[in-house]
Image (tube, rainbow, N blue to C red):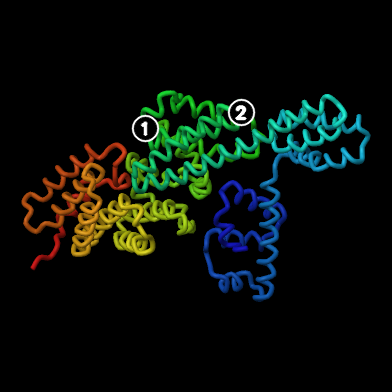
Amino acid sequence: MKLQKIIQQLDRRKYSKLVQQLKENKADKFLFLLTNYRQKKAKENELISQLKITPTAFYTLKSRLVDKVQEFLYNNTNESESRIRLLKNVANVEYLVYNTSRETAIGILKKLETELVKMDMPNELIIVYRAFKKLHIHSQKYYEYSALYNKYVAFNLGQDKAEELLCSFCKMLNEYYLNRNIQLLDILVRHKKEMQNICKLYQSHHLRVYENILNIHFALFSPVKKEMKEDETMEDMLKETIGIIKSHVDHPTYKHLVQIIDFLYFEYYLQLKLYKNASVYYEKIADDTPALLLYSHSSFVFHFLISKIEYAIVEQKENKLYAESDLRNYEVKIEDKPSYILFNVYTASIEFYSYRYYEATRTLNKLLNEISFILYPFIHIEIKLFLALVHILNGTPIQADILVESAKRTITAQNDEIKYRFHIVFIELLNVALSPKAKNKYEKLVELNEYFNAINTGAYRILEFVKLNDAILKNLTKFEKITT
């Protein structure tokens, strides 16, 4: 158990609760160690010195803190008491069948059935109906309970399929965002239709939640208008989904979906440029971005990193993102290429806006060297252009020129001027910045930047995370590639 990393990844609410618990128990040494690990104030040899204890005593203290953190996490992730009670009763169903009189067992199972239906626990209902079948093997009700058993088995399979479809859709959406491949868009459309067909088979709020989340993602990130004609508005779907979640407060999955809905609300209002509305949901999720990113299996949450920059630009706070970042210790597995790419683009962007150009070039170069972009030419070119921009501002125009020429060759190889038309305009802007012969360089840069911002919309929009303000444009006039 990596104690320090777990302590740093605790959300603020849980961390505060753990601190309060240690204070109440007057566990001062544990509290000292906890706060130091949280804030990364000192190395272990320094902590040993400050605590005035031997290394052996320190590692004993650390081991006991591990136990306390594990116990705290376990106690704070349990379900509600009513749900635990139901699960215990379900676990005793076989005992009822084999060790209790038939009438008593049926009476208890009837009560359990009512509670499980009320609490919406279909998996557990399968166990109950299987027991009912055994107890009614010589009764006409056997066929009634067989039908109910089969219904819930089929429903659970449908529910599992719907959840799997949502996960697959979000994974494919990540891929589509990075390469804007029309074939992937067709797959997203098929996923949408398949979800719709499953939801037609059963009247279930479970399925309705999954369908709404998928359809909202589709409308936000991969809209095909002809496939959305029969859909409700995004706002209606969002309201319905949050209403279902609030109506089932003890549901084990729903309470975890609230952050996804908050994220979708934020993206929805941001797209509409209703920034005051967006700010409400931004405040809910921005303070604990690491927690939000854990939902990448069921939502395109890593897009929040791009939208976070876009929103900060609107609020004129982009230069504060680096100082306020709570993702310094966050790690994304390189196997999850789309998330890894977006995370590093975000990291380079906040370095860019804090004028840490050398750090930004290092982050982007590392990304380009670590990842094979053969399947992602769209974002590959975008990253090269961003890196070229940073190189110019960093005073290394030769490297910028190499990247621009490389981007141009990649675009030529793709043979799709429409898809890469915004890349081409931005290349023109960078070429003016690099040109030693450009007259009225600043004025040309301003004109090209305004033109780029005006046309850079729609499905093939690029560099959402980059805004060239007047100060940056003026800095771009200071450097040019060396010619011989």
Where residue 145 appears, as percent x and y from the top left, is 77, 29
Q: Look at the image and tell me in which quarter the N terminus lies.
A: bottom right
Q: Residues within 10 Å of mark 1 (few under 14, many from 20)?
A: some
The answer to whether 158 appears left or right of 314 in the picture is right
For mark 1, give the secondary structure. loop
Query: At 87% across and 29% down in the image, what residue appears?
Result: 138
Q: Are marks 1 and 2 in contact (CB under 8 Å)?
A: no
Q: Look at the image and tell me in which quarter the C terminus lies.
A: bottom left
The answer to whether 210 appears left or right of 470 in the picture is right
Q: Amino acid at mark 2?
A: Ser
Q: CA gap, disc 1 to disc 2?
A: 26 Å
Q: Amino acid at mark 1?
A: Val
Where residue 232 appears, as percent x and y from the top left, is 46, 24
Label drawn at residue 204: 2
Where residue 334 appears, as percent x and y from the top left, is 45, 59
Query: At 37% across and 30% down in the image, what residue appears?
Result: 274
Query: At 46% across and 57% down in the image, what residue appears?
Result: 328
Quick one: 359 or 235, which is closer to the camera?
235
Label drawn at residue 27: none
**Which residue was labeled with disc 1?**
224
Query: At 77% across and 28% down in the image, what residue appears?
Result: 114
Above or below residue 366? Residue 294 is above
